[in-house]
């Protein structure tokens, strides 16, 4: 597979998810963001399989983040998944660019997949829980979502690093779950930053 085809296969799910989630509307902005998170998975896997080099992936992710930042500043056009004063999707793209450019391929992939899958899982679980209970679902966190985050992160690290001990896998997953749950820093920044700090566990 040539690079152009790989980039096309990586970009198509992302752009398609952004396009089609607009039909869910602004009331589903929180879950639309998570659907878009899931759409990053093919790009992460293509990078892991060596189909997209870091020299292409990292700049593309950075430019994608920059484009979303411009829409945020203009406060126009992407309101079905962009939430006012919440730059999570921008931080996501910039963090993806950073981890791919500076970390080893396997470890960068683990962080990318946790950011895409685990964050998506926890967001959807929390959305369902709070919507069912009649609460504002936009910015709340709950242990049910964190449990989903932990289990999915554990599965990801187990698949990418089957050789490391289960103690390391569990510890890594717990720490990233706590990084996602904390409220002091956007999790799209906190998770990759903490992931870098705990790399010795892997």
Image: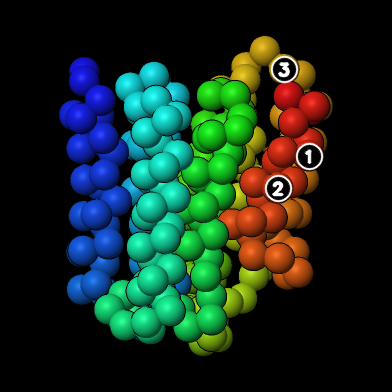
Contact (Cβ within 8 Å) of mark 2 with mark 1: yes
State the CA–CA distance, disc 3 to disc 2: 21 Å
Please tell me which residue is depicted at 62% across the width and 20% down the height of the picture: 161
Residue at image position (38%, 52%) is 63
Q: Nearer the viewer, residue 32 or 189?
A: 189
How was this image coloured? rainbow
Which residue occupies the foreground of this view, 192 or 173?
Answer: 192
What residue do we see at 21% from left, 20% from top?
Answer: 2
**Residue 50 x %, y %:** 39, 19
Residue 8, percent across and down? 20, 37
Q: Which residue is under mark 2? A: 193
In this view, the mark in front (3 or 1): 1
Tag shown at residue 16: none
Nearer the observer: mark 3 or 2; the answer is 2
Residue designated by label 3: 164
**In the rendering, which numbered label is found on residue 197?**
1
Badge 1 marks a residue whose secondary structure is helix
Q: Secondary structure at mark 3?
A: loop
């Amino acid at each position: 597979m040539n690079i152009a085809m790989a980039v096309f296969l990586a970009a198509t799910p992302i752009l398609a998810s952004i396009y089609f989630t607009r039909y869910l509307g602004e009331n589903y902005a929180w879950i639309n963001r998570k659907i878009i998170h899931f759409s990053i998975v093919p790009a992460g896997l293509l990078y892991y399989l060596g189909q997209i080099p870091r020299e292409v992936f990292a700049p593309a992710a950075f430019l994608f983040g920059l484009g979303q930042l411009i829409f945020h500043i203009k406060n126009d056009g992407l309101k079905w998944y962009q939430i006012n004063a919440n730059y999570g999707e921008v931080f996501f793209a910039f963090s993806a660019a950073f981890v791919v450019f500076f970390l080893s391929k396997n470890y960068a992939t683990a962080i990318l997949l946790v950011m895409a899958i685990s964050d998506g899982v926890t967001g959807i679980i929390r959305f369902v829980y709070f919507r069912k209970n009649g609460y504002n679902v936009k910015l709340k966190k709950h242990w049910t979502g964190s449990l989903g985050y932990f289990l999915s992160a554990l599965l990801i690290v187990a698949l990418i690093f089957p050789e490391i001990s289960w103690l390391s896998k569990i510890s890594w997953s717990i720490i990233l779950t706590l990084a996602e749950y904390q409220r002091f820093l956007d999790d799209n920044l906190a998770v990759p930053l903490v992931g870098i700090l705990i790399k010795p566990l892997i």
